[in-house]
């Protein structure tokens, strides 16, 4: 067991150590609360106890966890921490110590949940007058870990229904999937499972006849984001001079513009982007509460649920080191990765002196294949990468070329792959953050070389005219004949062209699939040892090759 598996929300219940049998739990109830724990790899514990115990309550009272740690003795996890009531609230004088352990996991247990058990001590008196609770009182407690709450499951965070209907449609899923697939790498079939997995850039394994067919279908890749490598399975370099990054930035700004218009038409405030340059911190809980004056208690504070800052908790990784891709996911979700790699890179993309030296295409390519992909992987919940098979009921994971209607369910919003990520509410927060970097880039150039970059409108999107720092006149987002299809989001699901668009994109996918299956890995490539953590085989990575992991390389 990894100590970080203790991170999460729990239903906490403590009870008086009364040996007399009772037929009502309330007779021995000491407290019930929502427990939130965040554990570092070194065993440090932070978090909160909040009352009442239900999540997303309009108002709550909090105790903050301090001086917490985990120790491992003979494979048993023991923990201790102190919880203090927050200043200027009704429970400001609450101070309790907790000591406990992780309960036993039965090898043949069914649906067993991770739980904690222990004892709690009241450290000091609290209350006043005739209602003083004396120090020294003890009780026993059990805390049962809850399931991770997906952002879509909280009404204030979920995408509004009309916009969700659009982005979850098969046509929109396929558009997003084929756009990214053509630009990325794909896993190659290998009859020998003992060989390390091999990947190749999709565009560079297509022959000219296949590319010609893709051009006829409207999806020709004019600007590949990577240079062509010497060997098909080797890595190319990011092309920072051909404008490929402009396609990335424009396409997603186009998506944001369309969804924003739908929100405005319904009189709803649009999804707010992550505003801090450093991104949500590792200790961020799923449910955030902000301090307000308590209207019933002058001079006291209450904490109210704040949806705009909620939903940003990092889901736990799979914690299965036997699968190589899990090591990448685990590291990407760690605090060490955030503070040592991700946050410094995020700050770079907000720094005027650096942005002022980059072309728009260079900015887009650098963001897409670094922090953009990391954000997708970091905030993806791998438990959301499966759905129950409608025929068998068994959990199933989508493969690269599996376009069964079951994957068009709006609940399939796994942030880690191309076919589903844009259905997740966090997609729009993280891409809002990316889009804000475009404005930082423009402002940086204005401060250094005023007037060198001219704004303009391109297909209803605020954009920039070609010049010294902008290369592409018409960035590619999707074929022009599909533009009308998405012009009116409310009619998307009933559009007569829906099936034609689906058939068009599936033809492109069939071409890619045929090229992948026909590709023969050179014998010399099969014998080369790999020193990179890329991705495991298709069967172990959600979405197969349509996954943000395969474009991210982190050296051991």
Image (cartoon, rainbow, N blue to C red):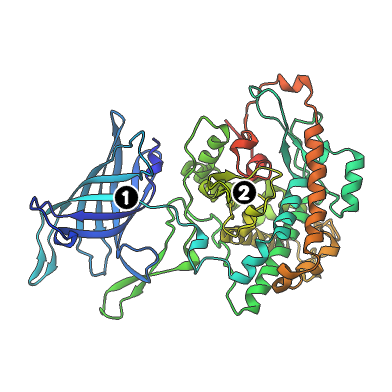
| Disc 1 packing (10 Å; few <14; some 14–19; many ≥20) | some
Residue 183 left/right relative to 537: right
The residue closer to the viewer here, 295 or 481, is: 481
Q: Residue at x 77, y 38 (%)?
A: 201
Marking on residue 371: 2
Q: CA distance from mark 1 to mark 2?
A: 34 Å
Marking on residue 192: none
Looking at the image, the residue that sits furthest to the front is 391
The residue closer to the viewer here, 316 or 210, is: 210
Q: Residue at x 68, y 61 (%)?
A: 169
Choose mark 1 or mark 2, whichever is in front: 1
The quarter holding residue 536 reads top right
Residue 504 left/right relative to 152: right
Q: Secondary structure at mark 2?
A: helix
The x and y percentages for residue 401 are 71, 44
Q: Residue at x 15, y 52 (%)?
A: 139
Quadrant of the image containing the C terminus: top right
Q: Secondary structure at mark 1?
A: strand
Q: Which residue is mark 1?
A: 144
Residue 359 in sight in this render: no
Residue 361 left/right relative to 344: right
The residue closer to the viewer here, 318 or 295, is: 318
Quadrant of the image containing the N terminus: top left
Residue 91 in sight in this render: yes
The quarter holding residue 113 reads top left
| Disc 2 packing (10 Å; few <14; some 14–19; many ≥20) | many
The x and y percentages for residue 331 are 52, 39
Q: How many marks?
A: 2
The x and y percentages for residue 210 are 88, 42
Query: Is 278 rendered above or below residue 296?
Result: above
Please tell me which of labels 1 and 2 falls first in the chain: 1
Q: Residue at x 25, y 49 (%)?
A: 142
């Amino acid at each position: 067991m990894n100590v970080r598996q203790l991170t999460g929300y729990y239903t906490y219940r403590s009870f008086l150590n009364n040996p007399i049998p009772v037929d009502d739990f309330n007779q021995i109830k000491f407290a019930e609360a929502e427990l939130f724990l965040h554990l570092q790899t070194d065993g440090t514990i932070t978090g909160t106890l909040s009352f009442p115990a239900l999540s997303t309550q309009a108002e709550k009272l909090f105790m903050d966890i301090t001086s917490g740690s985990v120790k491992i003795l003979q494979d048993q996890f023991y923990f201790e921490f102190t919880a203090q009531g927050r200043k200027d609230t009704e429970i400001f004088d609450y101070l309790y110590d907790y000591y406990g352990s992780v309960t036993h996991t039965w090898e043949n247990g069914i649906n067993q949940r991770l739980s904690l058990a222990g004892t709690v001590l009241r450290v000091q008196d609290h209350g006043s007058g005739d209602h003083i609770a004396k120090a020294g009182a003890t009780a026993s407690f059990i805390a049962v870990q809850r399931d991770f709450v997906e952002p879509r499951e909280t009404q204030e965070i979920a995408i509004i229904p009309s916009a969700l209907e659009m982005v979850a449609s098969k046509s929109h899923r396929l558009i997003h999937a084929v756009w990214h697939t053509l630009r990325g790498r794909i896993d190659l079939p290998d009859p020998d499972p003992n060989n390390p997995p091999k990947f190749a850039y999709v565009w560079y394994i297509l022959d000219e006849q296949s590319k010609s067919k893709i051009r006829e279908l409207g999806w020709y890749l004019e600007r590949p984001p990577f240079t062509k490598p010497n060997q098909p399975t080797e890595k190319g370099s990011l092309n920072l001079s051909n404008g490929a990054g402009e396609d990335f930035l424009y396409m997603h700004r186009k998506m944001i513009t369309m969804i924003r218009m739908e929100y405005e038409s319904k009189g709803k405030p649009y999804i707010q982007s992550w505003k801090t340059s450093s991104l949500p911190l590792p200790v961020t809980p799923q449910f955030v509460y902000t301090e307000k004056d308590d209207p019933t208690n002058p001079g006291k504070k209450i904490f109210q649920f704040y949806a705009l800052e909620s939903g940003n908790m990092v889901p736990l990784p799979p914690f299965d080191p036997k699968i190589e891709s899990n090591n990448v996911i685990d590291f990407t979700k760690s605090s060490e990765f955030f503070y040592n790699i991700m946050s410094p890179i995020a700050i770079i993309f907000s720094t005027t002196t650096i942005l002022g030296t980059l072309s728009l295409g260079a900015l887009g390519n650098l963001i897409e294949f670094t922090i953009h992909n990391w954000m997708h992987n970091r905030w993806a919940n791998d438990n959301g990468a499966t759905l129950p098979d409608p025929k068998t009921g068994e959990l199933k994971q989508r493969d690269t070329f599996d376009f069964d209607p079951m994957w068009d369910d709006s609940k399939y919003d796994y942030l880690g792959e191309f076919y589903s990520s844009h259905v997740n509410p966090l997609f729009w927060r993280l891409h809002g953050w990316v889009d804000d970097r475009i404005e930082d880039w423009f402002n940086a150039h204005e401060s250094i070389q005023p007037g060198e970059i001219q704004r303009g409108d391109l297909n209803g999107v605020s954009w920039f005219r070609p010049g010294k720092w902008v290369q592409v006149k018409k960035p590619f987002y999707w074929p022009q004949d599909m533009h009308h299809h998405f012009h009116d989001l409310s009619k998307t699901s009933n559009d007569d062209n829906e099936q034609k668009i689906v058939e068009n994109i599936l033809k492109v996918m069939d071409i890619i699939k045929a090229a992948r299956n026909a590709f023969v890995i050179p014998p010399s490539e099969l014998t080369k040892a790999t020193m990179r953590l890329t991705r495991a085989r298709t069967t172990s990575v959600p979405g197969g090759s349509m996954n943000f992991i395969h474009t991210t390389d982190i050296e051991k």
